[in-house]
Amino acid sequence: MSQPAESSSPSAVPAATPLSDVDYQARTRAVLDRIEATVDAWLDGDVIDIDSHRSGGLLELSFPGGSKIILNTQAPLQEIWLAARAGGYHFRFVNGHWLDTRSGVELHQLLSEQASAQGGKALQFTPA
């Protein structure tokens, strides 16, 4: 397994865009809703059999073969956390995008890479 790329400087990722609690909740709910809808569409279209389970701000994706990707909202930090076989990632909202706090990679790009690796086929998640 490859390890996530480390940023050469923690300041490489811009500061988070301030959000009200209500805005944070609405934005994270929309992200999880879109990811869940994408997985449901793949299941309906017989693309891949990924089971999803949602409980509040936590979305668990179970892949064929038993691996999982877990997305979890972290309201006190205003972040979204992603756990995959390759490791854990934290994303914060910066200028309209959820960016990894270490590498600056966008959430949907990294989720697509991890889901493709764990699903054994090219899978693409896109922001709304």
Image (cartoon, grey):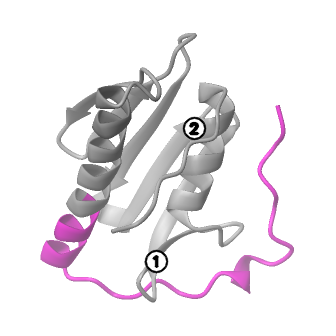
Q: Residue at x 80, y 69 (%)?
A: 7
Per the image, label 2 sits on a secondary structure element best described as helix
User: Tag count in the figure?
Assistant: 2
Q: Is residue 120 visible?
A: yes
Q: Is residue 85 visible?
A: no
Q: Quadrant of the C terminus?
A: bottom left
Foreground pick, 40 / 71: 40
Foreground pick, 40 / 103: 40
Describe residue 23's horizontal placement relative to residue 34 as left or right.
left
- Quick check: is 82 in the magenta stretch? no
Per the image, label 1 sits on a secondary structure element best described as strand
Q: Position of residue 25 (x, y in %)?
A: 19, 65
- Quick check: is 18 in the magenta stretch? yes
Q: Is residue 96 above or below residue 43?
A: below
Q: Residue at x 67, y 39 (%)?
A: 87
> Which of the 4 image quadrants contains residue 115?
top right
Residue extending furthest toward the left:
22
What residue sits right under mark 2 in the picture? 115
What amino acid type should be assigned to the residue bearing mark 1? His
Q: Quadrant of the N terminus?
A: top right
Q: Main secondary structure of the magenta part?
A: loop
Magenta-tinted stretch: 1-28
Residue extending furthest toward the front:
45
Q: Is residue 62 above or below residue 12?
A: above
Q: Position of residue 4 (x, y in %)?
A: 77, 50
Q: Which is more N-terminal, label 1 or label 2?
A: 1
Q: Residue at x 73, y 76 (%)?
A: 10
Foreground pick, 77 / 109: 109
Q: Position of residue 110 (x, y in %)?
A: 61, 54
What residue sits right under mark 1 in the picture? 97
Foreground pick, 8 / 114: 114
